[in-house]
Image: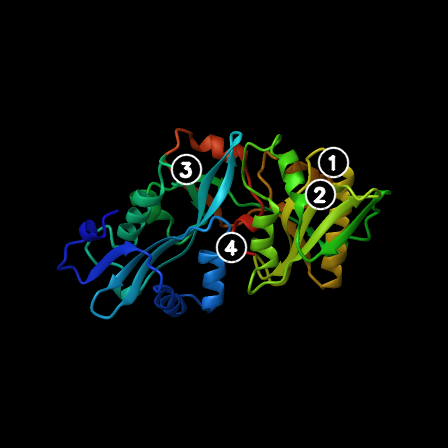
Amino acid sequence: MSEASAVPSRDPVAIRLYRPGDEQAIVSTYNKIFPVPRDLRHWYWKFRDNPTGHTQIVVAIESATGTVVGQYAAIPLAIWMEGRRSLTAQIVDLLVLPQWRTHGGRPGLFAQVGRAWIDHFIGEREGQDVFAFGWPVPAWRAGRKYLGYLNVRDWDILFREMHEAGPRARPEGLSVEEVPRFGADVDALWERMTGELRLAVVRDARYLNWRYADHPDVHYRLLACRARDGALRGIAVYGVCDWPRPRTAHIVDWLVPAGDQDATVALVAHCEELAAADGAPVLAAIFNHVDPRFLAFQRLGFLVLGTSYFVVITTVARLDTVYYRDNFYLTSGDSDLV
């Protein structure tokens, strides 16, 4: 995207790529719009320090004041897709100040900034994202009409009501421990699991530690399930948040081979004990509807609850929505809701 040709020079708003130093103005505008304030520490963690080392943001700047009046932003992520690593991006923190939403006429500033982001970052060239994904409930209609959003899947949630959940028997020979960070054996576990996953954010130790151990605002509990000989059988991430209901306990992330029933039960039992200790009314988890874990959790007593959220993608890949619907391995940690 050429900054000089992005908008006419007489336009009071310049649409351009993020430049180092814009972050203070971005955070200031963010805090004018969203109810939960953010600070620079959060911004640096999310956009500067993510594991890819890339920043993918397009901003709309009021030229006279330097105020950020709009933003289309994403977190670039490594993706495992059909046996090879590529790039994807999670779309987050979309914003336009109310008084600027109709700037430039139809389709409005949101679509203009979003179109500039897609044209620059989505594509088949080296370093571009194969697709981007997100949960844009408020922006869905404009995104579908002007930015090519495709509705992939409803965001249904598995849950177990804790008042009905007594202590679960744990399999013998396995233990679950809380760890401060994940290490090289998680990388080995991820490599083993790539054989059963066709499409998933790369869940190596670098990503998991950035997403959970290094999060500046939320405390997550990192759990490792091991056999007696110390071999890692699976990992889970546990946390508590107010989505979709106050003080919901979540199995935020999960990396356990689908056929390992014992490790599944051991980690679920540990998360249930944590949820009970935290006084959480429910323990929740999210998996793709056709993933075997979705049914396995129901067999462990979890029910299914529909939500108003759904997953959308923007892509240039020659794959239809059925491919993403059936193959995208997703947990709630792939979103910014928990």
State left or right for residue 96 relative to residue 86. Answer: left
The label number, if any, that marks residue 336 in the structure image: 4
Q: Is residue 38 at least partly visible in the picture? A: no
How far is disc 3 from disc 2 in space, using C-alphas? Answer: 29 Å
The label number, if any, that marks residue 130 in the structure image: 3
Q: Mark 1 packing: few (<14 Cα in 10 Å), some, or many (20+)? A: few
Which residue lies at the image location 39% right of the left edge and 41% below the top edge? 127
Secondary element type, mark 1: loop
Q: Which amino acid, by three-letter code, is at mark 4?
A: Asp
Residue 270 position, x and y percent, is: 76, 52
Residue 214 position, x and y percent, is: 58, 59
Secondary element type, mark 2: strand
Residue sitting nearer the eye, 84 or 13 = 84
* In this rendering, the label closer to the viewer, 1 or 3: 3
Q: Is residue 157 above or below residue 61?
A: above
Residue sitting nearer the eye, 247 or 29 = 29
Mark toward the start of the polypeptide (3 vs 4): 3
State left or right for residue 70 relative to residue 299. Answer: left
Which residue lies at the image location 13% right of the left edge and 60% below the top edge? 10
Q: Which amino acid, by three-letter code, is at mark 1?
A: Asp
Q: Quadrant of residue 228?
A: top right
Mark toward the start of the polypeptide (1 vs 4): 1
How far is disc 1 from disc 3 in space, using C-alphas? Answer: 32 Å
Q: Which amino acid, by three-letter code, is at mark 2?
A: Gly
The label number, if any, that marks residue 234 in the structure image: 2
Q: Mark 4 packing: few (<14 Cα in 10 Å), some, or many (20+)? A: few
Mark toward the start of the polypeptide (3 vs 2): 3
Residue picked out by circle 1: 260
Mark toward the start of the polypeptide (1 vs 3): 3
The label number, if any, that marks residue 56 in the structure image: none
